[in-house]
Amino acid sequence: MSDPVFLITGASSGIGAATARRAVAAGHRVVLAARSAEPLAALAEELGGPERALAVPCDVTEWPAQQALVAATLEAFGRLDVAFANACFGGPRGFLEGDPEQWRSMVLTNVLGAALTIRATIPALRESRGHLLLTGSVAGHRALPGSLYSATKHAVGALAESARQDVNGTGIRVTLVSPGIVDTPFFDRGTTQEEPLRPEDVADAVMYAVGRPGHVDVNEILLRPTAQRG
């Protein structure tokens, strides 16, 4: 089969799952990666089963797991055209709040995990002259009080630009997608009165970037709910 192949980390829910649905609707085959095996398998079945959607449980903080993810992609589908480093999570604001062990996991997932996805996918993306995308955040554009999450998203923004410069001349395009508040379990809806973005809104932004002609590289998309104040 020649349909393009779209790999997504953090694919079991939220932005990742919405993007997978949009990608399949646009004619891609998808590789779905996340730690949660059961929802991942259910999504893969919903999207067409083994011929269209491959579920690969993966801890993005582990280099062997990322290598195995790409190897499984190439074994199943023979190519990789789009890689979306989307796995991330947040925590409470305030440097006297939260669990330092959760901080460690957040930094490893949000920053190291994205970096490992970049490293693992570049060789295959070079072959396909493909597209690398990373999930940033509005919080990566301005420091939020006491927010380690904000610091990790500043780092992801730097990763995206560093990757763009590193792969310049290979044909690989690089896009940072930076949403504001999204209606997912990631956000505590009790802390805000804004009408949030929907995961599908962010997925549409991803697909917009992917759908541009090969000579057009949309380097960043920054999107907020219309009512978001910050």
Image (tube, rainbow, N blue to C red):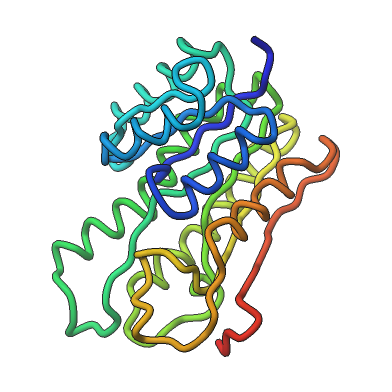
Name the foreground residue: 77 vs 164: 77
Q: Is residue 188 above or below residue 112?
A: below
Name the foreground residue: 171 vs 46: 46
Task: Indicate the position of residue 101 as horizontal and vertical percent values.
Answer: 14, 62
**Quadrant where the C terminus is found in the figure:** bottom right
Find residue 64 and report its image quarter. Answer: top left
Q: Residue at x 31, y 40 (%)?
A: 39
Side of 202 where 85 appears, left or right: left
Q: Residue at x 55, y 36 (%)?
A: 83
Name the foreground residue: 133 vs 21: 21
Side of 99 where 13 appears, left or right: right
Find residue 166 and report its image quarter. Answer: top right
Q: Residue furthest front?
A: 46
Task: Indicate the position of residue 23 as horizontal and vertical percent values.
Answer: 62, 37
Task: Indicate the position of residue 109 as horizontal and vertical percent values.
Answer: 32, 51
**Image mark count:** 0
**Quadrant where the N terminus is found in the figure:** top right
Q: Residue at x 45, y 32 (%)?
A: 46
Task: Indicate the position of residue 53 as horizontal and vertical percent values.
Answer: 48, 25
Find residue 172 and report its image quarter. Answer: top right
